[in-house]
Image: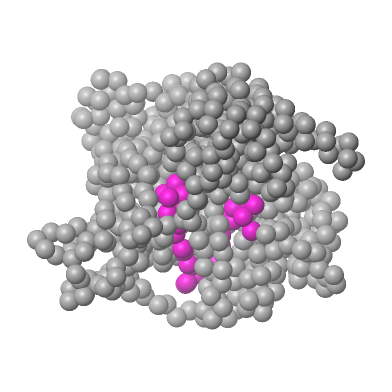
Amino acid sequence: MNIIVCIKQVPASTEIEIDPETGTLMREGTLSTVNPFDRYAIEEALRLKEIYGGEVTVLSMGPPQAEYALRFAVSMGCEHAVLLSDKAFAGADTLATSFTLACGIRKIGRFDIIICGVKTVDGDTAQVGPGLAEELEIPHVCYVRKVLEVTNGDILVERMVDEGYETVKALLPCLMTITKEINEPRFPTLQGKIFSLNTCIKIWNSNDLNGNSGRFGLNGSPTQVIKVFPPRKRKKGTLLTGTLSDKTKKLVEKLGELKLV
Amino acid sequence: MTKIEIIIKNCNKCQRCVKTCPFGYISFINESLVIDENCTYCSACVSVCKKKAILITRKEEKKDFSGYRGVLVFGEQREGKVADVVYELVGKGRELADKVKEDLYCVLVGNGMEDSAYELITYGVDKLYLFNDTSLAKFKEDTYTTLITDLVEEIKPSIFLIGATAIGRSLAPRIAVRLKTGLTADCTELDIDAEKKLLVQTRPAFGGNVMATIICPNHRPQMATVRYKVMRKAEKKPNPEGEIVRKNVNQTKIRDRTKIVDFFRNNDGANITGAEIIVAGGKGLGQSDGFTLMKELADALGGSVGASRAAVDEGWIPYANQVGLSGKTVRPKLYIACGISGAVQHLAGMQTSDVIVAINKDPEAPIFNVSEFGIVGDIYKVVPELIMELKKKTSAKNTRGI
C-alpha cells in the first residue's frame, strides 16, 4: 500500500500579537517546525504501513528551508520525501496550494491513501485537504479519529461530526484529514535521524510539475489579504473580593443582572 | 502582476514594517529596506507604515460579473433538522443582498424537507432551491458537491455562504475547487462594498492573535464559510413572498464514494461548539474527578463541559471537549474557566465568548486579564459554594412562580 502524507513547515510559535498602540506585529522568534497536526498524519501513515505493508512518501510545498520538516518526517520512518519549491509557488491561497500539491502527487504516481493533518496552525483554514481531494478527483473524509480497517478496495474510519461521530466507508484511493485524537506520534530514533541525513529529498520546481503555471502561487490565488489588524482587546474585569460566600454570592448576582442565570 | 515597491524618499527608516511582517520577509540591510521575493502581499506592512513608503499594486482584471447576482446560503440539515447556523446566514445574507438590492437564495438538500423549506421562506429567503429525495437524507460529499456546484453554475450567485460546521468545512473546499473560485475560512465579519459588489471578509488568523480582511475580486461566486453564533439570527418576516423551486435529482450523474455506516451521538451535550454556557476545566483541577464537579456546575447552569488541552492530554476528558487552537472554537454567552491558566492557545478558542468568568488559585494567571469576573480561590471550595448559590437562586425563582 502506498501512502502519501502532506505536511507543512510552520512558525514554531503562533504567539503573534499586534501592539494596539503602534499597530506593529510582535513576533516571538521565527523558528520553524512541522505543523503539529501533521505529526499525527505521519504517525498514522507509519502505523498503516506497519500493518498493511507498503511505503510512505512525505510531500511538502514551501521555501527551501522546508527540507527540515521533510527530514524530520523521514527520521520518524517515511521512506521518500518530495519538496515542491519555487518562487512561483509563493503567496498561494488554499486553491493554489491544493492545485500545486495535486500536481506533485500526480508526478509521484501511484497511491492508495493520502493523509493530511486536519489543519495548519498558521493558516488555520482546514481547506487544503478536501480541496486537494477534489483536484485529484478522489473521495475524502475529514476529521478522522480512528482507522478501523483497510481492505482491498475501501477504508473504514470513524470521523468526528458536530454532535458525535460517524463510521464512514470510503472507496480507495482516498484522502483523509485526521485529528490529534487518533494516535500518539513517535519520536525519531537515532537510527532514523542518521537515515534521514542520507536520504535524498527530491526538490521539484514549477517546470518539473505538469500544470498550468497560471494556477500556481499568487497568480493562481483568487483570495487577497487586504488588511491585517489587531483583534478587539478584552478589558480586564473585576476580581470579586470578600469571604468565599461573598464572592460566589456576588458572582451569581452579577450573572443574574446579565440574565445569564 | 501584483508588485510591492518601496518609495525610498518617503521612508523614515522607522522599521515598523520590519517588525510587522508576519513572515519575517522585510529586513533592514545597509540602511535600506529589503523585501524578500517570497512576499505574499498580505499588506500588513502597508497598514503600519505612517509615511506611505510601501506600495502594493495589484493587477485589476476587468472581468464582467454582471451575470452574477444575489447571495446563496447553504441550508445545512442534519437528520432532517435545519442547522441553527443557517438562520444566522439567512440573516446576514439578507442584509448583504439588501445593500446591493439583489435576491437571497437558499439551497436545501435532504429528505422530507418541505416544511423546513416553507419555514426558511418566512425568514426572508427570496428563492429556496429544494432537492428533496430519499437518497439525500444523509450528507454525502460527492452528491452534495455535484448538486450544489451544478446549481451555482445555473443560478450564478455573486456570493455563497456556508456554515463553518463539520459538514460545511468538508463540503465548501470541494465546491470551491470545482468552481475554481476563492474560499475564505471561518469568517467572523462580513460586509459588502456596494459599489464594486465585493464581499469584504474578516477572519481571525495566527490563532486569533491577528484579524485579516480578505477579498476575492476576480472570481465568482465569492465563497466564505462563516463561524456559527457570530452573525445575528434572521427575524421572521410578516409577509414572506419568497418561492420554493423544486429541483430534480439526476441520479445517473451521482457516484457516491463515501457512505455513512453508523452514527453515535455524544451524550451529555458534548457539542460544545453550539453551547450557550460552557464550564471548562483545566490542569488546575488536579485530577479527573474534577470534571464530575465541572459537570455538576454545568448542570446547575444548563450548560456543557469544556476543557483545556492540558486536561485532555492528562486523559481526564475526551478530545471532543477540548477548547482552543488545537481543539474547538466556541462562542458561548457565558464561559466559566476553572483552573485554566489562560495560555494564548486556549484563549484562541474562547476569547470571543460574551462573558468570561475565571476561577483560579493563582491571582497572576493570564486568564484573569480577559475575564469580566474573577474569583481567586480553590476550585474545590469555590465551585461547590457557587453551585449552592445557584440552586438557592433557582429555588427562589420557583417559589416565586417564575
Q: Position of residue A177 (x, y in %)?
A: 51, 39
Q: Nearer the viewer, residue A54 or B183?
A: B183
The reply, left or right, for residue A148 in relation to residue B60 is right
Name, please, the residue furthest toward the left: B30
The reply, left or right, for residue B361 in relation to residue A87 is right
Residue at x 52% of width, y 54% of height: B185
Q: Nearer the viewer, residue A112 or B317?
A: B317
Q: Is residue B63 above or below residue A66?
A: below
Q: Position of residue A171 (x, y in %)?
A: 59, 38
Residue A192 among magenta residues: no
Q: Magenta segment range?
A: B205-231
Residue B209 among magenta residues: yes
Q: Is residue A152 above or below residue B148?
A: above
Q: Position of residue B19 (x, y in %)?
A: 27, 56
Residue at x 75% of width, y 67% of height: B125
Name, please, the residue furthest toward the front: A242
Q: Quadrant of the C terminus of chain B?
A: top right
The reply, left or right, for residue A30 in relation to residue A249 is left
Residue at x 32% of width, y 65% of height: B48
Q: Is residue B123 above or below residue B53?
A: above
Q: Nearer the viewer, residue B327 or A128?
A: B327
